[in-house]
Image (tube, rainbow, N blue to C red):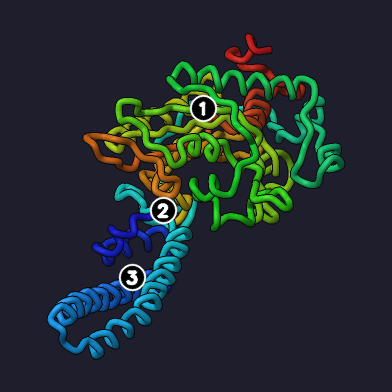
Amino acid sequence: MIDLKYIQNNFEEASIKLSKKGVGQDVLNELNDLFQLLKAANSKYESMKAEQNKLSKLFGEYKQKGLDTNELKDGIDKLKVQLPSLLEEARIADEKLQNLALVIPNFPDNEVPEGKDEDDNIELKKVLEPRVFDFQPKEHWDLGEKNGWIDFERGVKLAKSRFSVLKGTGAKLERALINFFLDTNAKAGFEEFNVPVINNANMLLGTGQLPKFEDDLFKIDGEELYLIPTAEVALTNLYNDEIIDASSLPLLLTAYTPCFRKEAGSAGRDTRGMIRQHQFDKVEMVAISHPDKSDEIFDMMVQNASDLLTALELPHRLVMLCGGDLGFGASKTVDIEVWLPGQGKYREISSISNTRDFQARRAKIRYKEDGKNLFVHTLNGSALAVGRTLIAIMENHQQEDGTIEIPDVLKKYL
């Protein structure tokens, strides 16, 4: 959640930052109106409460001196009737303010470039040169069918569109990638967890998926439970409403989970193949950090995800997202895009984000330092999206006869 006190005290500055992320002036005006309404209600309440205390004191003095207290009693009784309604007015204004705050995105960092969408993102660097083929490279769905690795038709039969079945070597390679990612993350200092893939509503509120993105979640009928869209939800919320000793920071966590997304806003996009599925495997990194160290950890997480692709001999590039393309909870994000020769373009395979204290405020994750409870910084990122990595291996390491070379680092897992 955004820092409401900061916005209230620095409204113009905060408005400029939020406009960089596409927050409209109407929302900012509504926010300001609620601030003023709450301030006026609280001020009026405090003023009347002070008046009540003053009259009550006089009432005691008058009674002690045997003076007429009828007029004072009438005034006190009148205030007693008015005060609850003022308190309720303030409560309603505060509730509206908190509800609005839940759907306002995080502030972007100053280094985040201006821009409306992915066309305005900034390429930071390329890693490895794309292979030059002496034949026309096939796309992964053709390779999957030829090698008997992917069965799209049976995936649809079992569920619906945007589900698929991996089999044989394809299924084994998926498992090998998961183990390779987890082992590499462990060497980088991340502790492995196995977490529930069903989380309650409060957990998704904590990491920012609720209430704004409920339409993209799979909800359990009759329960306030949801299938997780990413292990970030479970890993970050392991420390929901907890106070961590500063000496324990940073906490580095990793987990493999299946992930579930309705892809509600992607109608017509990537309907063929495995690029955009309702269910997919992912290995996630999460860091819970002291604010002074979060930038350093962010760079380490970006490098770790990039190193995984380098080890798999997969060309990729690092891209800094502009304000308009930045995710709801992120202050800054570097996307890692892998080269897919079948499509002839780079496609996202990981997003590494620093959310600063945005998620920590929502999830009440704090650390204790010098006797004070302060908000941590939380970071998250894929290392990596397993299905997309499988696709990238198929397309980049395909041979002219349609067979696929397995990267050396995976052979011990097979």
Residue 164: which quarter of the image? Answer: top right
Report whether 44 appears left or right of 204: left
**Cα–Cα span, label 1 and label 2:** 24 Å
Q: Amino acid at mark 2?
A: Met
Horizontal side of residue 10 vs 308, given as left or right: left
User: Residue 1 shows which numbered tag?
Assistant: 2
Disc 3 designates what residue?
35
Quote the CA–CA distance across marks 3 and 2. Answer: 16 Å
Q: Residue drawn at (36%, 45%), measured in percent from left and top?
A: 357
Structural distance between the alpha carbons of marks 1 and 3: 40 Å
Earlier sequence position, callout 1 versus callout 3: 3
Label 2 SS: loop
Which residue is disc 1 drawn over? 254
**Are the residues tagged 1 and 2 within 8 Å (C-beta)?**
no
**Residue located at (36% from left, 33% from top):** 244
**Residue 157 position in % (x across, y down):** 87, 42
From the viewer's side, name the closer residue of 192 and 299: 192
For the point 58% across and 14% down, the residue is: 409
Q: Residues within 10 Å of mark 3 (few under 14, many from 20)?
A: many
Q: Residue furthest left?
A: 65
Is residue 133 in view?
yes
